């Protein structure tokens, strides 16, 4: 699903934990697969840590109505988005 679709489905204030679904020819993410929806940055950190333990290393936190202000989460997003992982 695109970020616009996430915004429509989950509304403001929610954070989606997503993995890449489809990439374009430049390896940038076009659509995402939403694994879980949480309501705070702390919950997102906990879910991402849990997914890391399970081997899902390309999961990122996306806030469809705004930006993620946590610098580590933002860096992780751009590594996954641009396929640098």
Image (spheres, grey):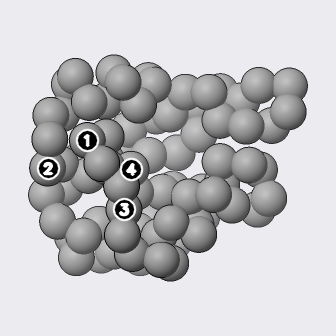
Q: How far apart are the two marked residues, 1 and 3, measured between alpha carbons?
A: 10 Å
Residue indicated by mark 4: 62
Above or below, comparing residue 56 to residue 17 in the picture: below
Q: Percent position (x, y) of residue 61?
A: 40, 57
Callout 2–callout 1 Cβ contact below 8 Å: yes
Q: How far apart are the two marked residues, 2 and 1, measured between alpha carbons?
A: 7 Å
Residue 67 appears in view = yes
Q: Percent position (x, y) of residue 26?
A: 85, 33
Callout 3–callout 4 Cβ contact below 8 Å: yes
Callout 1–callout 3 Cβ contact below 8 Å: no
Q: Secondary structure at mark 1?
A: loop
Q: Nearer the viewer, residue 17 or 2?
A: 2
Dividing the image into 4 quarters, which one contains the C terminus? Answer: bottom right
Q: Which-is-in-front pick, marks 3 and 4?
A: 3
Sequence-wise first label, 3 or 4: 4
| Residue 75 occupies quadrant | bottom right
Q: Residue at x 13, y 57 (%)?
A: 39
Disc 2 packing (10 Å; few <14; some 14–19; many ≥20): some
In the rendered structure, the answer to whether residue 75 lies left or right of residue 13 reads right
Above or below, comparing residue 12 to residue 43 in the picture: above
Q: Residue at x 22, y 76 (%)?
A: 42
Residue indicated by mark 3: 68
As drawn, which residue projects farthest toward the right? 25
Q: Secondary structure at mark 3?
A: loop
Disc 3 packing (10 Å; few <14; some 14–19; many ≥20): some
Residue 55 appears in view = no
Q: Secondary structure at mark 2?
A: loop
Sequence-wise first label, 2 or 3: 2
Residue indicated by mark 2: 13
Q: Which-is-in-front pick, marks 1 and 4?
A: 1
Sequence-wise first label, 2 or 1: 2
Dividing the image into 4 quarters, which one contains the N terminus? Answer: top left
């Amino acid at each position: 699903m695109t970020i616009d679709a996430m915004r429509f489905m989950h509304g403001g204030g929610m954070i989606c934990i997503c993995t890449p679904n489809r990439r374009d020819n430049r390896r940038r993410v076009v659509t995402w697969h939403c694994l879980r929806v949480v309501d705070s940055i702390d919950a997102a950190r906990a879910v991402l840590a849990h997914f890391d333990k399970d081997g899902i290393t390309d999961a990122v936190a996306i806030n469809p109505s705004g930006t993620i202000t946590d610098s580590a989460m933002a860096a992780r997003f751009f590594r996954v988005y641009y396929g640098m992982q």
